[in-house]
Image (cartoon, grey):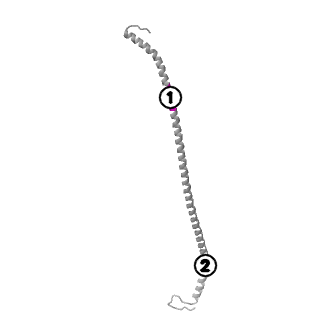
Amino acid sequence: MEIIATNALISINETFFVQLVSFLIFLYVMNRIMFRPLLSTIAQRKEYLSDFKEKILAGKEDLDRLNHDLDREQTKIVKEAHKVALSLEAEGDRRASEIVAEVMQQISELRHETERQVKEQVRQVRRELAGEVDTITLSILEKVLHRRLPS
């Protein structure tokens, strides 16, 4: 081998071809061992991520649909609850009116019974007092007149 002195960056000689063949073998080996599996893994990962994104979007659509259904059901249940509350309120008003009517009837009956009892007691007291009034009147007249009156 002969050393050639040149000022160029690359000199073309026998070592250049050996280095070129070595570099091509290195590229072939690197391609087989490293780049192909790495590119295959990258492609699989991209496919997995795109499938995962599709599943996420499908899940979001399902969630939106379920939320919409839930809102509809909630509105329906609130309406039904409102109807039930109104019917219970009407039933309560009706029952309260019945109770008030019953109580008013009982009050009226008690008032009539009490009036009857009071009238009866007044009659008894008048009968009792009628005899006593005559006796007391006679006694007062005798004392005022200072003489005895026939009974």
Q: In the picture provided, is 42 more to the left or to the right than 108? A: right
Name the mark nearer the viewer: 2 or 1.
1
Give neighbour class at mark 1: few <14, some 14-19, many 20+ (Cα, 10 Å): few
Give the CA distance from mark 2 to mark 1.
Answer: 116 Å
Give the total number of marks visible in the rendering. Answer: 2
Tell me the amino acid under the disc marked 2: Asn
Residue 39: assigned label? none
Give the x, y percent position of residue 30. 60, 78
Give the x, y percent position of residue 31. 60, 78
Q: Are marks 2 and 1 in contact (CB under 8 Å)?
A: no
Residue 31: assigned label? 2
Query: In terms of depth relative to the viewer, which is nearer, 33 or 144?
Result: 144
Q: Relative to 49, does residue 134 appear above or below in the rendering?
A: above
Give the x, y percent position of residue 26. 60, 81
Toward which corner of the image does residue 33 lie, by quadrant? Answer: bottom right
* Residue named by callout 1: 112
Residue appearing at x 39%, y 11% in the figure: 141
Residue appearing at x 52%, y 33% in the figure: 105
Q: For the residue labelled by badge 2, is the local secondary structure a helix, a strand or a loop?
A: helix
Q: Relative to 104, does residue 38 appear above or below in the rendering?
A: below
Query: In terms of depth relative to the viewer, which is nearer, 79 or 126?
Result: 126
Q: Relative to 122, does residue 76 appear above or below in the rendering?
A: below
Q: Which residues are magenta?
A: 106-116
Residue appearing at x 48%, y 27% in the figure: 115
Q: Which callout, 2 or 1, points at the residue further toward the start of the chain? A: 2
